[in-house]
């Protein structure tokens, strides 16, 4: 058996010739640092929030630690939190935090992804074959993959998931 080992033969990049455009959701990862504020830490007997004690704790809290960060306010305990508690946290945190949201940090990241995806100008993807990149260093929430698929499907020729060298077909415009 003989093989052609002509070292002068040019290497052919089949991925580049495929016409696939890679869309990397990791590029949309929010840049802001997220800090947590768990109301569980302020519950009396791990069950209720006492207004007087809560107000005193908020006054004593170092709010400057949230300077320039997104503050995710949530309660990880199974407790009923009065709405005014979130309002009080917001009044203290707003002068320092970049933003104050009622969410876990993971929920905020998901919301930030969805907001960015909703605002994307996708004109350059019209009629194209698109690979939504699958591997990333940062955690991309599943909701982001769903949202980008919903946005790209009406305009794309086809959608794939993975890497250009190894893709999973997701959608192909009918009639092609």
Image (cartoon, rainbow, N blue to C red):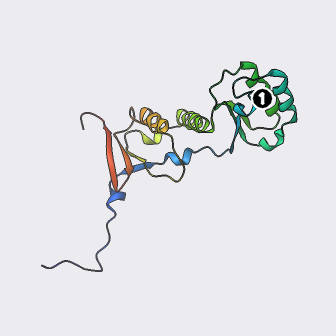
Q: Residue furthest front?
A: 45
Q: Which residue is mark 1?
A: 89
Q: Position of residue 48 (x, y in %)?
A: 72, 22
Q: Is 16 positioned to the left or the right of 140 in the image?
A: left
| Secondary structure of residue under mark 1 | helix
Q: Is 4 positioned to the left or the right of 75 in the image?
A: left
Q: Position of residue 71 (x, y in %)?
A: 71, 37
- The image quadrant of residue 70 is top right
Q: Is 13 positioned to the left or the right of 120 in the image?
A: left
- The image quadrant of residue 160 is top left
- The image quadrant of residue 154 is top left
Q: Is 79 positioned to the left or the right of 136 in the image?
A: right
* Residue depicted at 76% across the width and 19% down the height: 84
Q: Is residue 45 above or below residue 149?
A: above
Q: Is residue 91 above or below residue 133?
A: above
In-front residue for pair 130/36: 36
């Amino acid at each position: 058996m003989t093989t052609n080992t002509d070292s002068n033969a040019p290497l052919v990049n089949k991925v580049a010739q495929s016409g696939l455009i890679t869309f990397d959701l990791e590029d949309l990862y929010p840049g802001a640092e997220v800090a947590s504020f768990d109301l569980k830490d302020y519950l009396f007997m791990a069950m209720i929030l006492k207004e007087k004690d809560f107000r005193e704790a908020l006054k004593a809290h170092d709010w400057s630690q949230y300077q320039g960060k997104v503050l995710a306010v949530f309660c990880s305990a199974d407790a009923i939190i009065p709405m005014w508690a979130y309002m009080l946290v917001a009044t203290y945190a707003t002068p320092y935090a970049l933003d104050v949201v009622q969410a876990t940090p993971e929920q905020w990241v998901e919301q930030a992804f969805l907001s960015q995806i909703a605002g994307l100008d996708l004109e350059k993807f019209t009629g194209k074959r698109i690979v939504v990149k699958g591997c990333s260093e940062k955690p991309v929430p599943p909701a982001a993959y769903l949202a980008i698929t919903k946005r790209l499907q009406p305009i794309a020729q086809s959608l794939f998931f993975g890497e250009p060298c190894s893709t999973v077909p997701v959608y192909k415009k009918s009639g092609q």
